Amino acid sequence: MATTRILSTGLLANERPNVIDPYNNGQGTVLYNHNITEVDVVVDEMGGVSITDDPKTATGKMYRYDSLRVEYPTTADNIFSTLLSAKYPANTESKLVNEYQSAMLGLMPETAKKPYEDFLRDRLAIREMVDSDCKTLNIPMDL
């Protein structure tokens, strides 16, 4: 499981988590649970859990997911920008853009373009995921 200040990845739960889960801090904060997938697991005698790709060795199923803490307001735009910032801090995005532009000018090899192109593809996928979840849950785009 990886964790940043507001984003935890690879969490496991016995029950499917709600996509939007109130944080109950009195400030309108929610957890945005996403990338939810059912996985086969092996539970050992000590209660330790490991994910397996072999359904024959699985002793059960759990849900693996990522969870993002989102401050008020709960809108698609706020969830998207919070998730994007958690995955790609501003200095990382700036570095990718600079290297891409340097490659465009021939100052760096063509391969320097790929990380920024990958970022743009991931950004679009994040936007589509958030918008789809928010539409399903009747969460507005913005206030």
Image: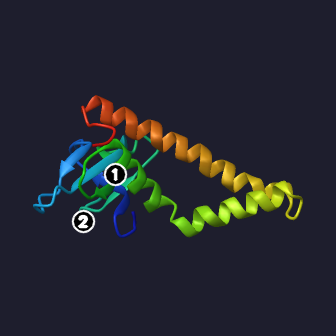
State the image coordinates of residue 91 (x, y, percent, origin top left): 57, 69
State the image coordinates of residue 114 (x, y, percent, origin top left): 73, 52
Give me the residue at 38% from left, 56% from top: 82
**How many numbered discs sit on the rendered protein?**
2
- Give the residue type at disc 2: Met
Q: Could you say whether the residue bearing mark 1 is in a helix, strand or loop?
A: strand
State the image coordinates of residue 62 (x, y, percent, origin top left): 29, 45
Kindly give the residue lying farthest to the right in the view shown: 106
Q: Quickly name the residue at label 1.
A: 42
Q: Could you say whether the residue bearing mark 2 is in a helix, strand or loop?
A: loop
- Give the residue type at disc 1: Val
Query: Residue 73 versus residue 39: which sits nearer the camera?
Result: 73
- Disc 2 to disc 1: CB gap under 8 Å: no
Mark 1 burial class by Cα count in 10 Å: few <14, some 14-19, many 20+ = some
* Residue 138: numbered disc: none
Give me the residue at 31% from left, 45% from top: 63
Indicate the quadrant where residue 23 lies. Answer: bottom left
140 vs 80, left or right, is left
Alpha carbon distance from label 2 to label 1: 11 Å
Kindly give the residue lying farthest to the front in the view shown: 143
* Residue 46: numbered disc: 2
State the image coordinates of residue 3 (x, y, percent, origin top left): 38, 67
31 vs 117, left or right, is left
